[in-house]
Structure formats: C-alpha cells, structure tokens
C-alpha cells in the first residue's frame, strides 16, 4: 500500500517520522459523501434521540417526576421561553407536577459583588450533597446586553459541585429583572422540587433594595457580608440587613480572622437593635470560610433552627401563602405590561410618540396619556 500525501503544514524536512501521512479512506460505493446519521437504537445516544423527539406535556411531567435531569433542563428552557406556544405547554407541565412541589427548603443567597457567593454556595452545596440531600442551584447571572445570555456562567465557577450526582445547577440570564432574579425563577423552583430536589438555593447577581424580590420567594434569606468593607458598601448593606434571616461573614480565614470576628460582634449588636418581625426568631451572625470549609455546618444548623421556629410558630406556612399571592400580583403586572406593548394601537403610534419625546417636543405625561387612550380603544 502506498503512502498518502503529506499535509501542506508539514515543515520541509527529511525526517519522515515528524509528520503523519493522510491516507485515503476505504471507498464505499453506496455512500454519497455526506456524513451518515448514527444507526437508530445502535449508535445514537438516548439523549440525542430524546432531543429530536417532539415532547408532549405528559412526557415532561413523567420525566420530571422520575428525576430525569435532561427533561428537567428542557422543561426549564420551556419555562424561560417567551413563545406563546411554549408558554401554554409550560403551564400544562407546571399544573401536572404541582402536587409534588412545596417540600423543599428554599434559600436565597445574596451579597455584594466579591463577597464570594459562588464559592460559598459550592462549599455549602457540596456539604449538603455529601449529606445525601439533593441540591438545586438557580444561579441568576447578569444578562449580556448584546446576546441576552448569561455572562458569568456559574457552572464554571462551581466546578466541583456541578460534578456531584446530587446537584443540579441552572445558570440563567437575569433578563434585566428587578434584583437580578430571572422572570421565571419561581416556576423553575417548582420544577426542581417536583424532580426531587429538597434544597433550592437561589443565588442573585448582587445586593441592594431590589433584592426584596428574592426575599419574597424563599423561606430563609441569607446575606453574605465582607469584613472590613469600605464605607462605599455600607449604604448598600443598610437596607438589606433588615431583611436578612441569617447573616454570614465570609472569608474568615488566614489574616482576616480577627477582622471577621470584630465585624461579627458589631453586626450582632446592630441586629439586636433592629425590630425583628419574625416571632420566635432572632437573626444570627455567623463566620465562614468556604475555602477552608469552616463554619458551613454552623450555617446549616442555623437554617434548621430557623425552619423549626417557623413550623412551631406557624409563620412559615403563612409566609409561603402570602408569597403565592404576591406571585399572582407580579404575574398580573407582567401580563398587563405585555398586553400594553403588544397592543396594535400602541405599536402603531409608539414610534412617533417616542420620537417627539426624544426631541423634547412632547411631555412624557402627555405621551403616556396618548398611549393609554390608544390602548383603551380611543375612550
């Protein structure tokens, strides 16, 4: 058999051992030269076959209730879609799995940028997974203004946790939603609960007054704090401390331990002066080092104390019931905004009105009145 042609990129050298020769393949008279699809049921992976199938609502429901991660991921993508067709199918799926929801511990994790949210969640989530809990992390990333996709990619920042068989990580673009919480995070949380994940962690982009949205959808709101942060962060912290059910000072390791302990004492005094509205519970201030896996068990023990207090004093059930009502109001607001933007009359006059407002020839309130008149059908 003769040797094949040497590739063009091979250096001009007499040492034949340097390069690999490209040999012709075995001719097949029945092959048209195009790539062949894998033989069905033989070489095609089950996941690939599943991806080609047009799934029904019952397919999704059965897969989610069976704990199928592939179908769970596809159902979440369905939930996040803005297509009317997908919206209807997604609601059918949600209705079908609703009976299996509500049995998890819902935790919100927030903190200033740089506090180590992802590092903490990886250490905390890995500990819970090792304790035979099933942990779903809904990591809400900042949204790219160009592509609309996630910027940070939490699976790359939680490498160890993402490989654990008891974990499920879903990074989602925030979509510009208030507080960095994706518009469909609540529905995603229900799907994860139905799939058997008994601890749901929702990581948000940052911290601020807008994080009240996170507080309105979880059982326990955990705020991560930095020791020795400058005054530029204090104003951000001030409004969020009142919402915190648990405060955790991160990076309490190496030469930062002394500063972390001082910050713990100061924050504990601040918390005691606040009027805590939760009966039977006083927010705790804890130390942790995710890098050294220190304080992680204390955090989980405090969360369990919080959940027990909520069950004993009955406010945990009432809290979830009120959250359901708030959820409905949020959906109504969203539906009204969508209806307004898609109204034919509004879409017809909006470009001209926007141009006049941009040029300073039309006051905003008068522009709003004209848009509302068009939306109401010329009342």
Image (cartoon, rainbow, N blue to C red):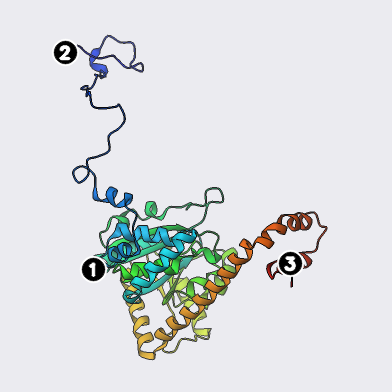
* Image location of residue 65, percent across then percent down: 28, 68
Crowding at label 3, few (<14), some or many (≥20) Cα neighbours within 10 Å?
A: few
* Image location of residue 323, percent across then percent down: 47, 79
Whether label 3 touches label 1, CB < 8 Å: no
The quadrant of the picture occupied by the N terminus is top left
Crowding at label 2, few (<14), some or many (≥20) Cα neighbours within 10 Å?
A: few
Question: Which structural element holds mark 2?
Answer: loop
Q: Residue 116: which quarter of the image? A: bottom left
Closer to viewer: mark 3 or mark 1: 3
Asked if one can make out residue 201 in the rendered structure from this viewpoint, the answer is no
Q: Foreground: 117 or 373?
A: 373
C-alpha span from label 3 to label 2? 81 Å
First-in-chain label (3 vs 2): 2
Vertical side of 13 occupied by 195: above or below? below
C-alpha span from label 3 to label 1? 55 Å
Closer to viewer: mark 1 or mark 2: 2
Q: Residue 4: which quarter of the image? A: top left
Question: Which structural element holds mark 3?
Answer: helix
Write down the residue under mark 3.
368
Write down the residue under mark 2.
1
Write down the residue under mark 1.
132
Q: Foreground: 105 or 278?
A: 105
Vertical side of 354 occupied by 297: above or below? below
Left or right, residue 74 beside residue 165: right
In the image, what residue occupies the spot 27% across and 58% down? 164
Vertical side of 210 occupied by 271: above or below? below
């Amino acid at each position: 058999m003769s040797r094949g042609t040497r590739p063009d990129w091979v250096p001009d050298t007499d040492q034949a051992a340097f390069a690999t020769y490209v040999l012709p393949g075995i001719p097949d008279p029945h092959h048209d030269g195009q790539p062949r699809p894998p033989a069905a049921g033989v070489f095609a992976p089950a996941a690939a076959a599943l991806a080609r199938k047009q799934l029904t609502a019952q397919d999704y429901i059965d897969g989610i209730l069976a704990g199928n991660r592939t179908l769970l991921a596809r159902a979440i993508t369905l939930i996040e879609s803005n297509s009317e067709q997908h919206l209807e199918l997604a609601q059918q799926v949600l209705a079908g799995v609703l009976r299996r929801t509500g049995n998890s511990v819902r935790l919100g994790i927030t903190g200033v940028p740089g506090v180590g949210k992802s590092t903490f969640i990886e250490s905390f989530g890995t500990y819970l997974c090792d304790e035979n809990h099933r942990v779903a992390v809904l990591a809400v990333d900042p949204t790219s203004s160009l592509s609309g996709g996630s910027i940070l990619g939490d699976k790359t920042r939680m490498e160890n946790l993402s490989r654990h068989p008891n974990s499920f990580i879903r990074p989602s673009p925030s979509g510009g939603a208030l507080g960095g919480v994706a518009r469909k995070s609540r529905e995603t949380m229900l799907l994860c609960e139905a799939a058997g994940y008994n601890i749901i962690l929702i990581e948000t982009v940052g911290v601020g007054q807008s994080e009240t949205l996170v507080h309105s959808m979880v059982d326990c709101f955990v705020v991560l704090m930095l020791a020795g942060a400058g005054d530029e962060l204090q104003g951000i912290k001030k409004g969020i401390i009142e919402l915190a059910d648990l405060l955790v000072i991160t990076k309490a390791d190496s030469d930062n331990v002394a500063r972390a302990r001082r910050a713990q004492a100061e924050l504990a005094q601040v918390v005691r002066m606040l009027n805590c509205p939760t009966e039977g519970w006083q927010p705790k201030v804890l130390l942790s080092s995710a890098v050294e896996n220190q304080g992680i068990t204390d955090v989980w023990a405090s969360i369990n104390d919080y959940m027990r207090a909520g069950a004993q004093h009955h406010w945990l059930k009432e809290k979830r019931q009120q959250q359901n009502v708030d959820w409905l109001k949020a959906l109504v607001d969203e539906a009204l905004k969508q209806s307004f933007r898609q109204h034919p009359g509004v879409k017809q006059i909006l470009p001209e009105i926007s141009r006049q407002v941009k040029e300073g020839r039309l006051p905003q309130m008068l522009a709003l009145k004209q848009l509302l008149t068009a939306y109401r059908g010329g009342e």
